[in-house]
Image (cartoon, rainbow, N blue to C red):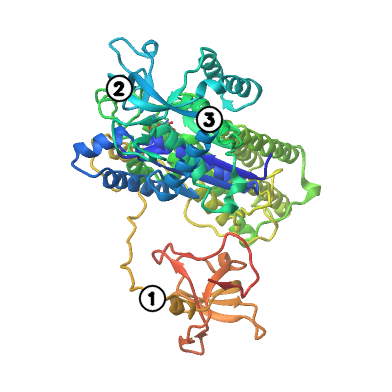
Amino acid sequence: MRDTFYVTTPIYYVNGAPHIGHAYTTVVADALRRFHSLRGRRARFLTGTDEHGLKIEREAAARGMKPLDFATENADRFRALWPLLGVAPDDFIRTTEARHIAGVQKWWQTCAARGDIYLGRYKGLYCVACEGYKTEKELLDGGLCPVHERPVETLEEETYFFRLSKYQDALLKLFRETSFIQPETRRNEMIAFVEQGLEDLSISRTSFEWGIKVPGDPRHVVYVWFDALFNYRTALEADPALEAFWPPTVQLVAKDIVRFHTVYWPAFLMSAGLPLPETVFSHGYLLSAGRKTSKTPGQGGPAAVSYTTNPAKLVGALGADVLRYYLLRDVVFGNDSEFQVPNVIARARAELAETVGNLLNRTLPFVTRVFDGRVPSVDAALCGEREAELVAHGAKVAVDSGALWETFAHHRAIELCLELARLGNQYFDTQAPWKLAKSEADRARLGTVIAHVLAVVRTVATMLAPVIPVKAAAMLGQLGLQLEAREGHDAWPAALTFVPADTVIAPGEPVFLKYDAKTEAELLAALKADAPAVATPAAPEAPKVDAPVAEIAFDDFAKVDLRLGTVLSAEKVPKKDMLLKLSVDLGEAAGPRTIVSGIALAYKPEALVGKQVVVVANLAPRDFGKGLVSHGMLLACGPKESLGVATFDRAFAPGTRVK
Ligand code: MSP
């Protein structure tokens, strides 16, 4: 396995708003990126928008808009959706950006110099929704496109051709001898397709304007698929350091565009002399009442769907992690799957709240009450068969689920995590810690049991981090832990991983919503397709955006001395509900500083000890009276009851300048 990982999604057409199908592919890509980062690999994830072509030109005209304005409006809707879903791409490319246009023209010239592009004439049946020609054989009765079930149009034009036929044998060899196409069913389909014989491909258009000009012949625009496919490459070309990511490790697509990615794309790359992607993985469709969910008008059929499939609305009601969990856990990757809102809630209730969350919630009170808020240690002499079984099962799950993620079977990897959490709950039930807690004589045994259960929670939360990043971090936070993803460090558990004895836990509100019958009914009502957008119990607070502050020169910014500090101790300030008094090491010879911070409603003092925070180090001291003086300020954001302090995703020496 390479130590770099590069995952891509298709770049989405901007003729409408994003829907749950787009969200699906993109969430999977994000989870894969997070998994591989956790393994310590240099990981990169690209998504973006496909903005040229007849389809966009026509839609924009129908709205009386310039194509670029129309494209920008919709590209922004895609870009804005990803953070709502907890999706964090490393780059978002638009095919109308200069970096992409220049790249496509360069690769066109490279293929032309190889003798693979020539001028000719083409007459064919064109599906505007696919942006592709169809053969008579492929059409459904009535001359309809087999993908979109809409009429095709006859186009005749002078066109540049790409010598696709020249690559037929090389493609067959690629398909047969490597795992370039996954899963197997798609590979067999593509072998059969190429075996029928490949004709050269028309890769320019003169019938419309909205595209990249063919170098040296501005009457032609580059065929939108030649243009779009190269995005995966052009997105890396501005920065030489990104070359290490080429070729892509895995390119995710649904079956509608497998042919473009597994026949045309590798042929273009062979011609361009570029190494080929390791795998193109074709997943199934998310279906809504049996039909592919889609934004193409007229495709969704009659309103048989009673629940919304609008991703923003789903996230607003359920939270991003619940939706992500369903998409990654319920849908067998590679198969079609019916998207059903009641099932999203059922899984969240039974698996997240009642299995994983419950294990955490029922265990922490013992740590608080019996062990003074510190994780107890394991007494090896008191470990028996049940503990051995738990440890062995934990190790097996850690190894097996890691392997399943590596082979695109994340739905099965998640199932194994669930199994481990169920075993943890059974262990809890059979060991009955509430009975052990009654007698001081059983204290060591109780500590051993609790330590084992916490190990299950830690291991499961770590393995679920790619799926439910916010909730996993919250669970680990309650265990007094932070997830550390950094290059070169494999943070995926190799075994059942214990929480170090004496770690100070930080119990808080339950991490998962408790789904009682009333909450569930309210959620379902809010998610009815025709329901107005209402706030529900799980809805995240509407973000309040602070007013912008006047621009400053860099020199002004540089006057602020931001430093990394390690919190050595923290305590409440008597009679001041909001304030904590911290001792923070800034690596200074004079010793740690006292900093008073208004974060007491959001943090228990113990939860801050050991944390690395960002400190404004040259702020004038502030006198809080009674001899309490603050020498600096912590950076934080959010409402006062739930704010977060700024910290880094890896450790640095105290005193390191933040700039
Ligand atoms: N612009 C092209 C892709 C160019 S890539 C160089 C395109 N765009 S699209 O907006 O139609 O997006 C298609 C992709 O969106 C699918 O391949 C799939 O990844 C995702 N999905 C769209 N609808 C989907 C479902 N109903 N179910 C699952 N995935 C879906 O094609």
Sequence-first tag of 1 and 2: 2
Residue 155 circle label: 2
**What label sits on residue 115 in the rendered view?**
3
Residue 354 in view in this figure: no
Q: Quadrant of residue 158?
A: top left
Residue 583 lies in what quarter of the image? bottom right
* Residue at screen point 38% across, 31% down: 204
Label 2 secondary element: strand
Q: Amino acid at mark 1?
A: Ile
Bin the neighbour count of mark 2 within 10 Å (Cα to Cα): few under 14, some 14-19, many 20 and up: some
Tell me if mark 3 has few (under 14), some (14-19) or many (20+) residues whose alpha carbon lies within 10 angstroms of its own: few
Q: Where does label 1 land, which residue?
A: 552
Structural distance between the alpha carbons of marks 2 and 3: 26 Å
Asked if the residue at label 3 sits under 8 Å from ligand 1, the reply is no
Q: Which callout, 3 or 1, points at the residue further toward the start of the chain? A: 3
Q: Is residue 71 left or right of residue 613?
A: left
Q: CA distance from mark 3 to mark 1?
A: 54 Å
- x, y percent for residue 213: 37, 40
Q: Position of residue 71 (x, y in %)?
A: 31, 44
* Mark with earlier residue (2, 3): 3
Amino acid type at image mark 3: Gly
CB contact under 8 Å: marks 3 and 1: no
Q: Closest to the observer: 119 or 408?
A: 119
The quadrant of the image that shows the N terminus is top right
